[in-house]
Amino acid sequence: MENVMLAKALAIGIGSIGPGLGIGFIGAKAMEAIGRNPEAAGKILVPMLLAAAFAEAIAIYALVIAFGIK
């Protein structure tokens, strides 16, 4: 039983490292771009949100895999 719990913890823990870093980089680069060109904030916001949503979907896949481990 404790091996299953360890496997679930590792699956979600390791599976969320990449998306967490990705969302951080996405936000940092978007803020940098808006800082350089504030008029482009509207054009930057939507692609930034889409990229963050795709990165978050990968973390959700890791969560689904963690729940699927028996």
Image (spheres, rainbow, N blue to C red):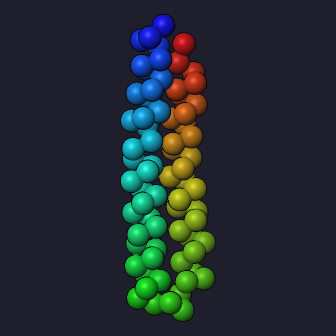
Task: Kindly identify the residue that appears in the image at 45 percent across and 76 percent down.
Answer: 31
1 versus 60 height, above or below: above
Determine whether, in the image, residue 52 is placed left or right of residue 17. Answer: right
Which residue does the image show at 55% across and 83% down from the upper left? 41
Quadrant of the image occupied by residue 2: top left
Marks counted in the figure total 0
Depth check, front residue: 42 or 24: 24
Quadrant assignment for the C terminus: top right
Residue drawn 45% across the image and 49% down it: 19
Q: Residue furthest front?
A: 2
Q: Position of residue 55 (x, y in %)?
A: 50, 52
Look at the picture and state if 14 lies above or below 54: above
Q: Could you say where residue 34 lies in the image, as x and y percent from the top left?
A: 47, 83
Q: Quadrant of residue 17?
A: top left
Between 29 and 5, the one nearer to me in the picture: 5
**Up-down: is 32 above or below 4?**
below
Residue at 52 percent across and 61 percent down: it is 51
